Amino acid sequence: MVIAGLETSLVTLEWTMAELINHPRVMSKAQEEIDNVVGRARAVQESDLPNLPYIEPIVKESLRLHPAIPLGAPRMNLKPVKLAGYTIPGGCKVFVNIWAIGRDSARWSDSEAFQPERFLGSSGTIPVNGQNFDWD
């Protein structure tokens, strides 16, 4: 379990760094924000995160395009259910394709593009606590 948690964190970090390298404008904006808030004399700490509003959207956008686990953990429905015109019998194992959801052009404008700004709103960033279905 520890290795699985470590691996997913490393994969997320690698994809995020790759996207930043391929999008110098985004990297420059993130670097400027970190320099202004934290400076160059010390490392970023968890307590700095509330003052770094552009970093969270970068991570969310990276996770949208490159989920650490493309197919979610299998789920089982207890009762038959109708979904999008299909009947899924009770007791079926269902895998959610997280990768496809994050690239669904019906849901995301310019779905293949790395645009952290899509997670910035007039009232701040979209929360990840499970109450906002734009992210979940």
Image (cartoon, helix red, strand yellow):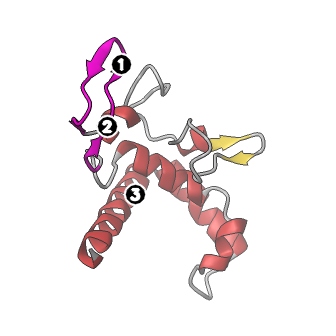
Q: Which of the two discs, 2 and 3, labels the residue nearer the N terminus?
A: 3
Residue at mark 3: 16
Circles 3 and 1 in contact, beta carbons < 8 Å? no
Q: Which of the two discs, 3 and 1, labels the residue nearer the N terminus?
A: 3
Picture quarter with the N terminus: bottom left
SS of the residue under disc 1 = strand
Q: Nearer the viewer, residue 19 or 85?
A: 85
Q: Is residue 8 left or right of residue 45?
A: left
Q: Is residue 70 above or below residue 134?
A: below
- Membership of 79 in magenta stretch: yes
Circles 1 and 2 in contact, beta carbons < 8 Å? no
Residue at mark 1: 82
Residue sitting at x 34%, y 40% = 98
SS of the residue under disc 3 = helix
Give the residue type at disc 3: Thr
Circles 2 and 3 in contact, beta carbons < 8 Å? no
Magenta span:
73-94
Residue sitting at x 56%, y 36% = 134
Q: Nearer the viewer, residue 8 or 38?
A: 8
Residue at mark 2: 77
Q: Which of the two discs, 1 and 2, labels the residue nearer the N terminus?
A: 2
Q: Is residue 79 above or below residue 130?
A: above
Residue 76: percent from the left, percent from the top?
28, 41
Residue sitting at x 35%, y 67% = 9
Residue sitting at x 56%, y 48% = 130
Residue most extreme to the top: 85
Q: Quadrant of residue 54?
A: bottom right
Residue most extreme to the left: 92
